[in-house]
Structure formats: C-alpha cells, structure tokens
Amino acid sequence: MDKVPYFRLKPQSVTILYSFITWLVSCLLYIPALVTPKLRLFVDGRKSVWNYLKAYRLADKKLIWLHAASLGEFEQGLPVLEQLRDTYPDYQYLITFFSPSGYEVKKDKLPGYGVCYLPLDTLRNSRKFLDITRPEIALFVKYEVWPNYFRNCKKLGIPLLMISAIFKPEHIYFNRFGGFLREALKQVTHFYVQNQESATLLLKIGLSNITISGDTRFDRVMSIILRDNHLDFMSEFKNDKTCLVAGSTWPEDEKILFPFLEEQLSSSDFCAVIAPHQTDKRTVDNILKHFKEYAVALSLATPKEVKASKLLVVDSIGLLTRIYAYADIAYVGGGFATGLHNTLEPAVFGIPVIIGPKYKGFIEAEALVKAGGVISVSNPESLEKVLQNLLFNPEYCEKAGMANRDYIAQSTGATMGICNGIKNLLNEA
C-alpha cells in the first residue's frame, strides 16, 4: 500500500504535526545553543518574551504589529511604520524579529516601539501571543509566512497583510508539496507585492487579493539623502581626496579588492574605507596588519590619526549608510561569498557601485546592473579595469552614478500605497 504524502492528510492533522515538529525543534535547539553564540541568542532571547509583552501592552491602546525576519526586512517595513505613527500617534507599535541579527541590533535603538523576538510558531504560542497583543492589524514583511500565526489571525478577525512581498517559481507554495503553506497564504487579507511575477504566481494558485506596490526599500533609502549625514571624522579623513567605500565585505571580497588598494593607497589623492561585515577583533586586526602604516581602526584611532591615515577600518555598526555619503565609488560585499548586501544604500547617493558576480535573484541589483549604475566584477583584473575607468573617466563615473540615483527615484511610492490600504482597513474596523 502506498504511503499517503503529508499534503493529502487532513488539514487539522498537518497543523498538529507541524506544531509538534516546531515545538520539538525548539527543544532540541538548546543543545547546539550551548556552543553556538548566535543560537544561544535565538533561544535565550525568547525566554523573556511573554513577560516583556505583558509589561509593554497597554489595555487602553490599540496596537499595530509588524514582523520581520531580520534587519533587511525590518528596513523594508520601517517606512510603513513611520508613516502610520504620523497618522495614528496614539497607537502602540510592536516589532518582532525571528533572527538575532535583527533583534540584537535594534532592541535598544527604537524609542517608542516595542521590540522582541517572535515566539516560535506553535499553536499554543501563536494563540497566546495574539491574546496578549490584540493587534488591530498584522504586517508581515517580504517572505515571512508562519501558518499558525496566519491561521489564528484569520480566526480572530485580525487583518493580515504581507508587504513588500516577493514570490518566485521555485518557492514551495507553487509545487505539489506546498499544499500546507498554500493554505497559510489563503489566510492573508491582502498581498502588497514587489513585482508582476509575484502577482502572477499568486493568481495561479487562486489568490487575487493583490496589489503590485513595489518595494518599500526605495522609499527608505530615499529618506537617507534627506537627513543629516555629516560625520566629523569622515570630513577630516576624506579631505578632498577621492574616496572608495567598501561596505559589508567578506574575506572573499577583500581578496579581490586588496591588490588594487595596495597600489592606490600610495597616491596622495586617494583614500579608502573598509566596513567589514564581521567587526570582531580578529577580522579587523587582519585588515590592519595587511595594510600596516596606511590603516587605522575607527574605534582605536585619535582624530589626528584618522586624518593622517589613508585607509579607515570601521569596526562599529550603524555608521555605514552615512559613510556612503562621502564615497565617490562604492564596493558592496557579499557577491563573492554568502549573498550580496544592500546596493541601494550607496546607490542613492548617485555614485557608481561595484559588486561581485553572485547577484542573480537580487532584483534591485539586477535592475541597477542593467541600468549601468552597478557594475559586476569577477576577479582582481576585472575589478582593476573597472576602478581605473571610474577613477580616470569622470564622465563615465558620473553617468553610472546618476543611473543609480534616477532608478531609485523612479521606484519610490510603495509606502504610500500600502499605508492607504492599511488606513482603509483600520477605518473599517
């Protein structure tokens, strides 16, 4: 007798099985968490969630809840929250994260918002979370789909939106094993998707509650150039020199980039900033040793030493977006390693951006490469050729930079469309 695949089981049985597996995994995580710092944060951070929520939640206030997997998704959701706060200043606002890389960075840096981990997606956790928080509306960013939270939101009449959502043909929802997660998508009140492909895929599985709104990250990065990006140490460091800023670099990026920097740092009119993705002592020390007398670490150097140096190693988090304001050329890491980092943050300043070869699937990077503002390189030789062209051909450099700026300016507006939809739902409640 053939085995019955799980997607043909009764929905209630699948839900119970899914919740049991989620609970079992949460128990088993305690073992590797003993030796893995990131997992320890993931496990320990959830221990205090219930007490935090009970203390934060005020009975006489309405609440809007936004969930983001990590830091990148949070940046997509933040423009929506900021606009909603302007419209509904008396509401409480709760942000939950799945990953430590989001929560640990933002937990103490968002005054006026509640910030905590999302309890794992069991039946009990999801119902308890919603009973305590009682949100007026739930906003899930990009990829985040948690079946029990979705199902319980629907049962309790809580409107659930997916914002800046993106779907691809290879996602499990669109193959024969995805029945359980397709059912989760059916609980969503409205999808605000980034592109036509996502809308088409949802239509094929019978979902039509869709608006193609675009990506809120474009609104987020456009706000960057409107704020005060002045940094005293960068003004002193750059001092009219041509400045290359390499952000979120990995060792694989540095292997490609360092030979060019070794040649250029002897020039009196060139300087560089490296902001590695990992800012631990070992990573920073390796960079400093490689460049010796040219380099200083930001946290260790005096203002005089920063001014006199040619290469500045940024060993603290939270400064990179403002440092890009001083760049003439940017290099964004990850394209030779684990996955490309944010190309929009430097591109919005109207400068050319260089990346590694692994950018497929990063929609904004693909578009910017096509527009000519982001340039992909595959080895030290191609990097040197591109940088020499940018450094010594001002017209080419300016054209590439403006291609980035123009593309981003033309892609804004997602936040307004999403917020108008949310206002309509809240007014109907």
Image (spheres, rainbow, N blue to C red):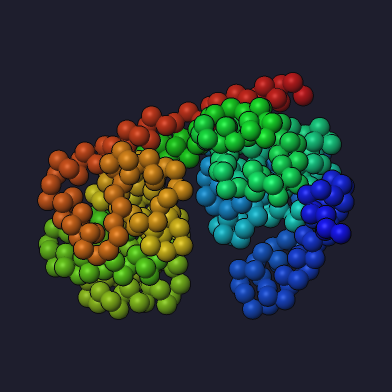
Q: Is residue 347 above or below residue 71?
A: above
Q: Which residue is painted at 38% across and 62% down in the image?
A: 336
Q: x, y (%) of residue 90?
A: 68, 32
Q: x, y (%) of residue 177?
A: 70, 50
Towards the viewer: 83 or 254: 254
Towards the viewer: 89 or 270: 270
Q: x, y (%) of residue 148?
A: 79, 47
Q: Determine if residue 162 is in view.
A: yes
Q: Is residue 38 above or below residue 129?
A: below
Q: Is residue 49 above or below residue 83?
A: below
| Image quarter of residue 384 | bottom left
Q: Residue furthest front?
A: 1
Q: Which residue is painted at 71% across and 42% down in the image?
A: 182
Query: Looking at the image, how many numbered discs can be counted on the residues?
Result: 0
| Image quarter of residue 122 | bottom right
Q: Determine if residue 91 is in view.
A: no
In the picture, measured across the screen, residue 305 lies left or right of residue 169, that is left
| Image quarter of residue 420 | top right
Q: Which residue is painted at 75% across and 65% down in the image?
A: 25
